[in-house]
Image (cartoon, rainbow, N blue to C red):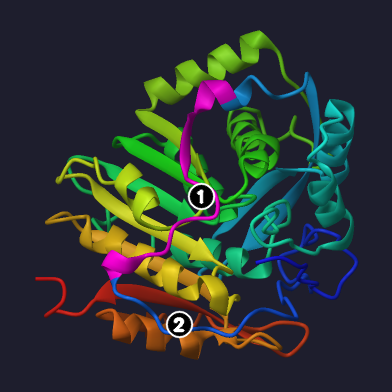
Amino acid sequence: MSGTFSFGFSGDDISGEEDSSASRIPISSPPVGNVSATDNISSPAVAPSVYNLEDLLSTLPSKISYNTLNINTHAGHNVSIPRRELFDIRLQLMAEDRGDSQALLDGLGTGDITPNVYEGGFKTWECSVDLVKTVLDRDVFGDGVILGDHGIHIVELGCGTAIPTLALFQLAVTEPRHRYKFTLADYNYDVLRLVTVPNLLLSWALRKTAKTDWKSDDDLEITPEMLHHFLADLQRCGISLEAISGAWGKQFVELLSHDERQVRRLVLASETIYSPASLGTFTETLLELIRGGGKAAVMALVAAKRVYFGVGGGVDEFCRALARLGGEAHEIPCVAENGSEGVSRVVLEISCSAVMSQ
């Protein structure tokens, strides 16, 4: 598949206020086909690959610029999440002067995506903010909602800037109570190294800095000593991190199939059902991750707009795909909101039907 999806806005990232008007609305895509059985997941455009944190950290420059996104939840929680600035990402790409960077630079400037090349991961999309509110208000790390005696594995599909994961990561480094494993998955390796991992480092730095000393817009100096301290602190807190690039599908699921049965899994995804072309594979992958939890508890949350105009994607299409594959979606109360363009948003809890999950 080739071509470009346009989101119809200038390409600026969502602002530091949670009610930004930025929308992930592509305007053209092939029509959705029949959803196949799980055993017939199509071959990925780019085979998934796993990267360790140290390798991704080694690609960072000596300084990164950031701004801070402030999120207030319905239950009164608040979290500040620093994110690498788009212009800083652009500067690094230009300095590296790679021959294959043009599509990434174009995406940074216009907000467009190029299927199988750049899928929009440099930007923060508004449904990811809804997902942050959900995981904080439901207190997924407390009261036994998802945590068990053997820890938790958090998987974010199509993570991009990884805002939902970052909110939970900050809790894990601030009050370490269990073992935590974070898997951050994005189609683009460059998104993982240029924004996902830098954002993890920024969230850690924020939590280890006195509030009076932290600036909402500034530069973070990155030294070998800081990176050593970062990695040592993660080990002290019982946190492990890995990143996966490439497409969803059989190979992707197999990379995550080595979980211990007792480790509970939390699967997160936002703005991942806008394209009918990838809806079937995403749905199959999501359900396989739920079933792959075995006897361990699994919670899966998907945030999305109800309708993605012009392409046929949306919540109804997703729910039909789920039903055909033995899944169910339950809307979480008091989360749905209307965006500035009048498109309502929702967070869904996904499960397997009783018959299919046996």
Label 1 amino acid?
Thr
* Residue at the far top in the pictured view: 225
Q: The N terminus lies in which quarter of the figure?
A: bottom right
Magenta stretch contains residue 48: yes
Q: Is residue 199 left or right of residue 340?
A: left
Relative to residue 216, is residue 57 depicted above or below?
Answer: above
What residue is pinned by disc 1? 165
| 299 in the magenta segment | no
**On the rendered structure, is 308 left or right of 253?**
right
Residue 149: image location, x then y, percent = 17, 42
Q: Residue 203's spot in the image, x, y percent? A: 61, 38
Q: Amino acid at mark 2?
A: Phe
- What residue range appears in magenta? 38-55
Q: Residue at x 59, y 69 (%)?
A: 271
Where 85 sits versus 38, above or below?
above
Task: For label 1, count other residues whose C-alpha is less than 10 Å away and answer few (under 14), some (14-19) or many (20+).
Answer: many
Residue occupied by mark 2: 318
Residue occupying the far left of the picture: 358
- Choose between 178 and 341: the one closer to the eye: 341
Can you see residue 47? yes
Task: Tell me the quadrant of the picture where the C terminus can be found.
Answer: bottom left
